[in-house]
Image (spheres, rainbow, N blue to C red):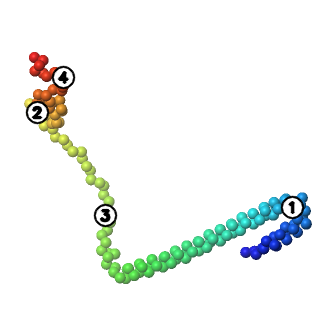
């Protein structure tokens, strides 16, 4: 942007030292640094604003190209074969889901007493008693006689 050679910077520093003086030179450099920072900040904001405007313009142009291309494709599709568009089945009508009832468990009943008979599988103790086995820590029922 600006072409400043190191010799030119040295010349500016010597002139500043002679004009401002060594006593006030640090204060002057602080002020110059402050204003250079503000100028950079403003330039950064201008640059980012310009970049965002360029992006928006590009997006708008892409949207227009997309709309034209989409319109062209729709026209070609409609002219090529209008029958598939008409042959589509209408969407199904949404209905309430079917009602699912809980299964009814029918139990056998004793006809004499009208009490339900349990049809659960036998427990291990019932099986052991049926075949005459006893657990090892209990005495055999016949030995108790």
Q: CA distance from mark 2 to mark 1?
A: 115 Å
Left/right of residue 36 with respect to residue 113 in the rendered view: right
Q: Position of residue 76 (x, y in %)?
A: 39, 82
Mark 1 vs 3, N-terminal side: 1
Mark 2 vs 1, N-terminal side: 1
Q: Say which residue appears at 88% left-offset and 65% top-offset.
A: 17
Q: Nearer the viewer, mark 2 or mark 4?
A: 4
Q: Is residue 124 above or below residue 99?
A: above
Q: Counting other residues with Cα less than 10 Å from the Cα at mark 1, is it few (<14), some (14-19), or many (20 or more)?
A: some
Q: Is residue 11 above or below residue 123?
A: below
Q: Position of residue 107 (x, y in %)?
A: 15, 38
Q: Say which residue appears at 89% left-offset and 58% top-offset.
A: 23
Disc 2, disc 1: CB below 8 Å? no
Q: Say which residue appears at 84% left-offset and 67% top-offset.
A: 13
Disc 2, disc 3: CB below 8 Å? no
The residue carrying mark 1 is 25
Q: CA distance from mark 2 to mark 4?
A: 35 Å
The residue carrying mark 4 is 138
Q: Nearer the viewer, mark 2 or mark 3?
A: 2
The residue carrying mark 3 is 92
Left/right of residue 36 with respect to residue 141 in the rendered view: right
Q: CA distance from mark 1 to mark 3?
A: 84 Å
Disc 2, disc 4: CB below 8 Å? no
Mark 2 vs 4, N-terminal side: 2
The residue carrying mark 2 is 110
């Amino acid at each position: 942007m600006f072409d400043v050679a190191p010799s030119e910077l040295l010349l500016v520093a010597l002139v500043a030292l002679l004009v401002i003086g060594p006593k006030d030179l640090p204060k002057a450099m602080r002020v110059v640094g402050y204003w250079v920072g503000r100028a950079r900040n403003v330039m950064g904001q201008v640059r980012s604003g310009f970049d965002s405007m360029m992006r928006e313009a590009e997006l708008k142009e892409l949207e227009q190209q997309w709309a034209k291309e989409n319109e062209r494709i729709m026209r070609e599709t409609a002219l090529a074969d209008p029958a598939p568009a008409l042959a589509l089945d209408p969407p199904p009508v949404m209905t309430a889901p079917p009602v699912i009832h809980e299964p009814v468990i029918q139990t056998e009943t004793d006809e004499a007493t009208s009490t339900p008979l349990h049809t659960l599988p036998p427990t291990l103790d019932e099986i052991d008693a049926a075949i005459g086995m006893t657990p090892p820590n209990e005495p055999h029922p016949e030995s108790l006689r």
